[in-house]
């Protein structure tokens, strides 16, 4: 059983709102850097950056972060991880880094992402932006910016697709 | 997807598995370029080296790889005398497992020892060189190095020069290169040619100049100096004249050919200093890449469901 | 004690018998053969329904390991293993510790065999003292003590002059010199056949030439001296050709091969299973075909086991340092009966190669079921299909590359010097 949660318009609205919130909270983009978590967060970070640049009429650095080596489930996953690129375009020391991911679930990926990020430098602070917050946190982590909160059952799956990656924008809930 | 808990040889790997290891190693190479060269995935794991032959290089490379992955690295020192006395290899291996190791790296002068341990042990066995059989991580780091210069393997002409018959490095490289569809030429004297080696899909040359013609990659091998006394060669001087890599012989290869050597080198025996230190040499890069590749191997094997 | 074997199909090429017969045994001897239902009363009946009743097998190449290596095998366990495999006579090689190069060792072996042996044991004496290729042993004394042939098996006679002398001197007694043909310089350090497989596994090869050069040498010396040469464990196509050629020239040579040389090829070694490590090494498919051809055309006279039992610890180790040898007595019949099933030879030829000719080569009155002969008989079921379980071998040596193989043809009962061993009852 699958159910559409957000369509293209919903997604764009959510991204626009998050862009405003990020600018607002950080009082501009002067000391800001976005980092998308491989692999769902990368496209989202780019879109969020375009939106912010449009609003602020300025440039914002966007990086990508692979957290494979920082995961805590190496032995428990049935598939072997495929390593992707990490590219942090600027020195993140004393910057405000907004980590971007598509779905926030147990919080373990975010924990890994923070560990990974800290190995690249010492940001002044780290914030978190996600498109979907589906609950079921296992760690004390919360999103600073969330596109939409969607209560789910633990076994359900959320599939986020963005048109940059092939098909059209959609968020679908597949019940487990 | 790596299927086995062990890395016994390249012989046992598929091309897809080789590529997965190389891709993963690229990720670790990035890690090694950072200020903080350590990542946590093997935290709490223990890597034990069981080397029945001395090898500072391979062991150090594995030790660094383990530490960069946050694993503990322990050296199980084997006294040569106990090996001579025939102290049971099986008992030693079981002891290491009982001590709580997750990986055992084994180097042994006798081919097939890693396979023997693999049958006895539940933990991961990594072949760090067995007899004249294989040295898989050396071949993987060589593939990684070649890939970084030549991008693809298909159709690449690679010459392996030297004592092929006794070389596990040559064997592993032959398997890797043929699996990745490179053209392999072996250049060696007939006394150091393995029996029926052409059946592995390689060309055999006894003339260095002809063999090196238009190659993209030249791999030199270390010559064990005692081969001379065993009648394989009349003298090291004659060997160098016939098979030593010099500016003259290397000039037969393509202009952008790279020169590799697994180390440690015998300068003036298999390779002239001008070549070893020359701008075609990638020998030191091989060393750096070795750590990334060994990290990839440890990391991927740790992820194999037992 | 009078025993009658009935309901069986008797095959005895020595008397040209091939049909349903009953065999009456009185004590240690065969009393007589009778058509079905015509035999006199007996105290004990052995039922051989569905079985062939054949002469007990004779192995002229067995390593019983005693004295010196009792942890590998003893005369007691080795002969039990023999009768389990249908053998009623074994000739044991002298590479014990001490080497069987003197009367005391020969007597020791025969004494042990008498006390603890399940079947007949004939020692083979060393050609040279200590098998070190330097001085001839006292052949006359050894023969008087019970040796029936001479060999430096395992430590081949490197000195050609010494081999010449052995072939010459042994003519006085008309005893065979059994040669383990191996050029030790060519084979040095080798553990497998030299070829593609040795390249693949990275183990040092033993070239076929290491065997063939010595076969050629010994054939020349045999021609020169007119001695009685028997070539042990022929493993290569080249050796078969050399022997065939020599025989065609009338040279007085006989030759043996072993079941592993016509049932295995070296490709199996890719697993590094040390149970496949044997000397001479397992060769290639070409050699296997040539060996079968040699068996078929009579170039190879007999099948011997080269039973070489080893302790587990000597085998479960590095391939390079693992011991050479296969525990062969308990699988030899089925592995050779395979040749009959696939029509390389018929059963009569197999019996000739495993009973009659081996006896002839070493001068024994064995290998026959004729009245008055020793009651040495094997009852074999040619149809039984079973899985080899080397852990259940009666030999101490469980070192078999045929473990877990499915074989056809089982030894159901063995009668050795009138004593009945029956495995069909349990
Ligand atoms: Zn022998």
Image (cartoon, coloured by chain):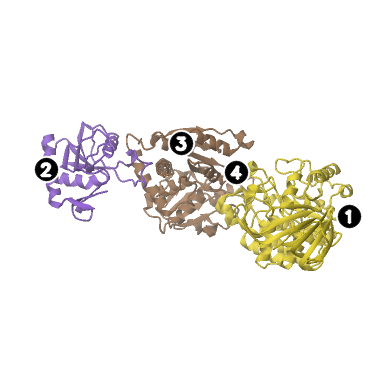
In the rendered image, residue B225, in percent from the top left (x then y), is placed at: 58, 43
C97 or A135, which lies in front? A135
- Which numbered disc covers residue C318? 4
Q: CA distance from mark 2 to mark 3?
A: 50 Å
Which one is nearer the viewer's eye here, C29 or C108? C29
Q: Is mark 2 within 8 Å of ligand 1?
A: no
The answer to whether marks 4 and 2 mark residues whose Cβ atoms lie closer than 8 Å is no
Q: Residues within 10 Å of mark 3 (few under 14, many from 20)?
A: many
Which mark, residue C173? 1
Residues beneath discs 2 and 3 located on the same chain? no
- Chain letter of the residue beneath label 1 in the structure image: C
Q: Chain of mark 4?
A: C
User: Mark 4 packing: few (<14 Cα in 10 Å), some, or many (20+)?
Assistant: many
Residue A54 sits in which quadrant? top left
* Chain where mark 3 sits: B
- Callout 1: helix, strand or loop? loop
Bin the neighbour count of mark 2 within 10 Å (Cα to Cα): few under 14, some 14-19, many 20 and up. Answer: some
**Residue A17: numbered disc:** 2
């Amino acid at each position: 059983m699958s159910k559409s949660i957000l369509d293209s318009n919903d997604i764009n609205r959510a991204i626009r709102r998050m862009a405003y919130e990020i600018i607002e909270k950080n009082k501009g983009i002067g000391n800001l850097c976005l980092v998308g978590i491989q692999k769902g967060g990368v496209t989202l970070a780019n879109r969020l950056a375009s939106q912010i640049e449009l609003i602020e009429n300025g440039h914002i650095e966007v990086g990508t972060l692979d957290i494979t080596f920082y995961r805590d489930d190496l032995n428990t996953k049935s598939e072997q991880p495929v390593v992707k690129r990490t590219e942090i375009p600027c020195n993140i020391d004393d910057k405000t880094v907004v980590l971007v991911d598509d779905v926030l679930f147990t919080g373990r990926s975010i924990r890994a992402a923070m560990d990974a990020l800290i190995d690249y430098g010492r940001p002044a602070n780290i914030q978190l932006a996600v498109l979907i917050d589906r609950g079921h946190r296992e760690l004390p982590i919360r999103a600073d910016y969330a596109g939409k909160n969607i209560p789910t059952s633990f076994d359900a799956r959320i599939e986020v697709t963005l048109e940059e990656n092939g098909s059209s924008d959609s968020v679908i809930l597949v019940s487990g | 997807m790596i299927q086995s808990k062990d890395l016994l040889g390249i012989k046992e790997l598929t091309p897809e598995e080789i590529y997965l290891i190389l891709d993963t190693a690229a990720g670790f190479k990035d890690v090694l370029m950072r200020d903080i060269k350590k990542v946590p995935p093997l935290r709490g794991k223990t890597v034990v080296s069981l080397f029945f032959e001395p090898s500072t290089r391979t062991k150090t490379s594995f030790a660094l790889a383990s530490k960069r992955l946050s694993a503990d690295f322990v050296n199980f020192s084997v006294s040569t005398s106990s090996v001579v006395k025939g102290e049971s290899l099986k008992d030693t291996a079981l002891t290491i497992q009982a001590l709580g190791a997750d990986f055992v790296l084994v180097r042994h002068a006798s081919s097939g020892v890693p396979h023997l341990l693999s049958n006895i042990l539940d933990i991961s066995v990594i072949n760090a060189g067995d007899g004249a059989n294989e040295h898989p991580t050396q071949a993987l780091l060589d593939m990684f190095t070649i890939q970084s210069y030549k991008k693809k393997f298909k159709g690449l002409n690679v010459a392996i020069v030297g004592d092929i018959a006794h070389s596990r490095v040559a064997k592993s490289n032959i398997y890797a290169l043929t699996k990745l569809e490179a053209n392999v030429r072996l250049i060696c004297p007939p006394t150091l040619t393995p029996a029926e080696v052409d059946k592995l899909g390689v060309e055999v040359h006894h003339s260095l100049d002809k063999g090196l013609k238009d190659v993209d990659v030249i791999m030199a091998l270390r010559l064990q100096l005692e081969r001379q006394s065993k009648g394989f060669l009349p003298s090291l001087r004659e060997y160098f004249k016939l098979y030593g890599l010099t500016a003259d012989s290397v000039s037969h290869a393509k202009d952008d050919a790279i020169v590799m050597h697994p180390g440690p080198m015998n300068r003036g025996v298999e390779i002239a200093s001008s070549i070893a230190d020359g701008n075609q040499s990638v020998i030191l890069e091989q060393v750096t890449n070795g750590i990334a590749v060994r990290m990839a191997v440890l990391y991927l094997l740790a992820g194999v469901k037992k | 004690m009078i025993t009658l074997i009935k309901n069986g199909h008797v095959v005895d090429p020595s008397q040209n018998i091939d049909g349903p017969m009953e065999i009456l045994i009185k004590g240690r001897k065969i009393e007589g053969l009778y058509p079905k239902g015509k035999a006199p009363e007996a105290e004990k009946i052995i039922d051989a329904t569905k079985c062939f009743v054949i002469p007990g097998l004779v192995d002229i190449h067995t390593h019983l390991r005693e004295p010196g290596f009792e942890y590998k095998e003893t005369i007691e366990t080795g002969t039990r293993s023999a009768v389990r495999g249908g053998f009623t006579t074994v000739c044991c090689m002298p590479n014990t510790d001490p080497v069987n190069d003197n009367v005391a060792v020969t007597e020791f072996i025969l004494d042990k065999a008498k006390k603890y042996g399940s079947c007949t044991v004939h020692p083979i004496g060393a050609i040279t003292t200590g098998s070190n290729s330097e001085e001839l042993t006292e052949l006359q004394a050894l023969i008087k003590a019970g040796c029936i042939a001479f060999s430096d098996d395992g430590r081949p006679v490197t000195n050609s002059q010494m081999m010449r002398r052995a072939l010459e001197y042994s003519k006085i007694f008309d005893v065979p010199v059994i040669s383990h043909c191996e050029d030790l310089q060519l084979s040095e350090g080798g553990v497998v056949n030299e070829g593609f497989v040795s390249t693949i596994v990275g183990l040092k090869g033993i070239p076929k030439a290491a065997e063939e050069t010595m076969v050629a040498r010994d054939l020349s010396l045999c021609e020169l001296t007119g001695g009685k040469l028997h070539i042990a464990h022929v493993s290569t196509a080249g050796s078969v050709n050399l022997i065939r050629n020599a025989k065609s020239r009338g040279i007085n040579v006989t030759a043996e091969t072993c079941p592993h040389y016509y049932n295995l090829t070296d490709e199996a070694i890719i697993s590094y299973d040390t149970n496949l490590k044997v000397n001479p090494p397992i060769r290639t498919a070409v050699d296997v075909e040539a060996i079968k051809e040699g068996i078929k055309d009579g170039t190879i006279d007999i099948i011997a086991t080269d039973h070489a039992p080893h302790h587990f610890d000597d085998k479960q180790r590095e391939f390079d340092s693992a011991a050479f040898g296969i525990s062969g007595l308990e699988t030899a019949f089925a592995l050779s009966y395979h040749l009959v099933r696939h029509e390389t030879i018929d059963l009569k030829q197999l019996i000739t190669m495993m009973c009659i000719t081996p006896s002839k080569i070493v001068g024994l009155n064995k290998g026959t079921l004729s009245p008055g002969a020793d009651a040495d008989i094997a009852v074999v079921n040619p149809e039984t299909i079973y899985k080899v379980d080397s852990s259940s071998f009666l030999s101490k040596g469980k070192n078999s590359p045929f473990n877990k193989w499915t074989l056809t043809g089982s030894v159901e009962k063995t009668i050795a010097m009138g004593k009945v061993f029956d495995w069909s009852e349990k």
